[in-house]
Image (cartoon, coloured by chain):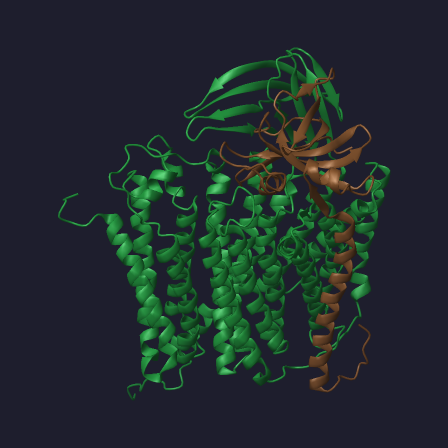
Chain colours: A brown, B green
Amino acid sequence: MARAPASPAPRRQRLVLAGLALVAVIGAGLIAIPALEKEATFFYAPSDLARNPPAPGARIRLGGLVKEGSVTREDDGLTLAFTVTDGARETPVRYTGIVPDLFREGQGVVATGRLGPGGFAAEQLLAKHDENYMPPEVAKGLARAGTTGAAGPLHETRTLAE
Amino acid sequence: MSPLLPSLAELGHLALWMAAGAALVMAAAPLRPALVGLARPAAIAHGLLLIAAFAAMSHAFLVSDFSVSLVATNSHTAKPLLYKLTGVWANHEGSMLLWVLILGVAGLGVALSRMPLGETFRARALGSLGIVALGFLAFLLFASNPFERLDPAPPEGLGLNPLLQDPGLAFHPPTLYVGYVGLVVAFALAVAALLDGKVGPAWARATRPWVTLAWAFLTMGIALGSWWAYYELGWGGWWFWDPVENAALMPWLAATALLHSIRVLETRDALRNWTLMLAIAGFTLSMLGTFIVRSGLLTSVHAFAVDPTRGLFLLLLLLGLTGWALLVWALRAPKVAEGARFAMTSREGFLVVNNLLMMALLAIVFIGTLYPMALEAWNGRQISVGPPYFNATTVPLIVLLAVLMGLAPFLAWKRGTTTGLSRRLLIPGIAATAAAAAALALLGVSGLLALLGFAAAAWLGIASLQLLLRRGLTFVRAGTALAHLGVAVTILGATASGALQREALVSLPVGDGFEVAGFTVTLEEVAPRAGPNWTALEATLAVGRNGAPVTTLRPQARTYTSPPMETTEAGIAMWRAGDLYAVLGKPDGSGRWQIHFWVKPLIHFIWWGALLMAAGAAVALGGTFRVTALARRRRTAPAPGPAPLPLPAE
């Protein structure tokens, strides 16, 4: 931003402005791209996890259907264990917190969290928003595994921030 | 109504077609000098016809005319009157109808306001508005006709999504649309200026009110949406970096940059092409926002239309309109003469830096919002980009912006005279240091970004108050000071509600209690409740502090009947400028109840700050109208007139 007090020729000031705009956009790109690589979360269906497992400890989104009869609550009354299935494979999931309005057995769910030795630890749950809908990612994940579903709005809840 | 007469809905449909005809005339008028005179009457007819079409649709909703398909699928006779009316735009077709209505009214404004730049210029601006209107009317008439009829008419409607039956949300779309349309008008004026080649202070004076208006309404629209999401969705947050939120944030960032650069153009005749480029960017991003929200491309409560042909039509419309906008700019911008020069330490220089930071923020939000879609289209990988990305990238830039915002209004135009500046900035500097120190020592805040947030809010807030108290206050400066103060207040609310938030997640039987952040919370009762179209389980939470009762929270787990849907109603009570916020989980048959309880200090500052920003814009706008009125009075006043009346000789 340093500039001689003597004003430059008009044409140069226009060029300088254009150059600065370019610097701003490139700078934004330089901030954005590493952050994107670090923070973007990839979506996996249980079959994808088996085929192409994520890096250990990476934050991912796991989606599929909540398996019928798989939901159990632990003694603290807050932690939920259930199984996510895409029809071909299954992944056990644990989540501590209030579940979204439309979290139900046999329905679509997307869990954000990390894959550990004992299964998937979810920090956040998204469930479908009304009776006719399913998150599109889940529908595509199911389609890859050979099951079907429809797309639509979501509802989510999170566990404690700490 | 007599069966011989066409129904009001048919007349509304006809009005929509006639409005499309008027828009065609508007678009054609600037092409031939002989037709220029048609632009104003066509724009007036266009505006009135759209008002008529919208009135017909509102009537159909108010009297529950279920022969109109849109009413049958989105309304219900048992719905409260207010939500029958707001139901007009709480659906895909109706919201697009509202969009063109506001565009029509804006066209009326351009046609009827004073235009010092001449009738050819006005016709060119109305021509651009006509082209945009034609595109959207074609979309309405061919791809999503709001007046489609059902024969036979069903006896009852399907009802409105209960999440949308809410005052905060009822007025969120109209507010946001006024903002979008204001940017469309700024764009139309920019195209006219490019065609005329006359870009200067006179053009900036004519355009700035529209930009200010658009900015104020975008600010309020975004704030209303955020407030609604906070208290209605029951997720405990106020901004989720959801693509639909970003779709409104991006035009706001462009409008903010434009608002500042147009001031430079008006005062100093500099940044000509730059300002035009921002006007075009604002329009393009408004179109992109409308596309993202309305195409059903994204999953959110906003995605009404999950019809791929509509999405394709909107995409083609978006590409056509933005392609045209960029083409006009590329062809005509080189012909615009260079504006005045300035030193980088002048106020213009700092406004340029503001613009660059806004542009960087815009690019970051743009990349984060569109990258997942682009990646999926490219190789089918599904990713999600959420708050961790956006917070890490935008918060440092916002802090930097706040520092410069406190400084810039004290700088002189054109040449950098920094004398007296350090004295003026001493108090804000001390306040910022004190705020960060107090947050660290007294409140136990340790995060670097949070400390910077407190410091930035104190710095900007005190500097803006100083600006307000300085001698020689003008409307524009008072507006600037209020809006900047609003930004400081919002930063304080966002920082405090995040850094000082405390929460508890418990499962407990009726009669038990828990403690969080000095509050004692007791679950007194869980009982069924019933409303007009819902039933619920309601928990009664008695909240106390230091042995004295503070408030009672009543969170609910609600079930609506038409359409059937379960929702979470958070129990919220204001405490000082913050909130106590509780959510009840569904029964699990164990006899215990899950409660998620938050203490959110100062969270109301977030929305109060937005109100201050909009108030600042209103004050600046008031100044514009006062100046215009003065100029008019001066022209028509007889006293100092150049040709004095002949007086009778004495």
- Image quarter where the C terminus of chain B lies is bottom left
Q: Quadrant of residue B338?
A: bottom right
Q: Is residue B454 above or below residue B349?
A: above
Q: Is residue B384 left or right of residue B180?
A: right
Q: Position of residue B445 (x, y in %)?
A: 82, 39
Residue at horizontal 39 percent and vertical 75 percent from the top:
B123
Closer-to-camera residue (B596/B443): B596
Closer-to-camera residue (B501/B646): B501
Q: Quadrant of residue B378?
A: bottom right
Residue B474 visible within the image: no
Residue B503 visible within the image: yes
Residue at horizontal 67 percent and vertical 64 percent from the top:
B359
Q: Residue furthest bottom?
A: B649
Q: Quadrant of residue B354?
A: bottom right
Q: Is residue B160 above or below residue B553?
A: below
Q: Is residue B145 left or right of residue B234?
A: left
Q: Is residue B327 left or right of residue B433?
A: left
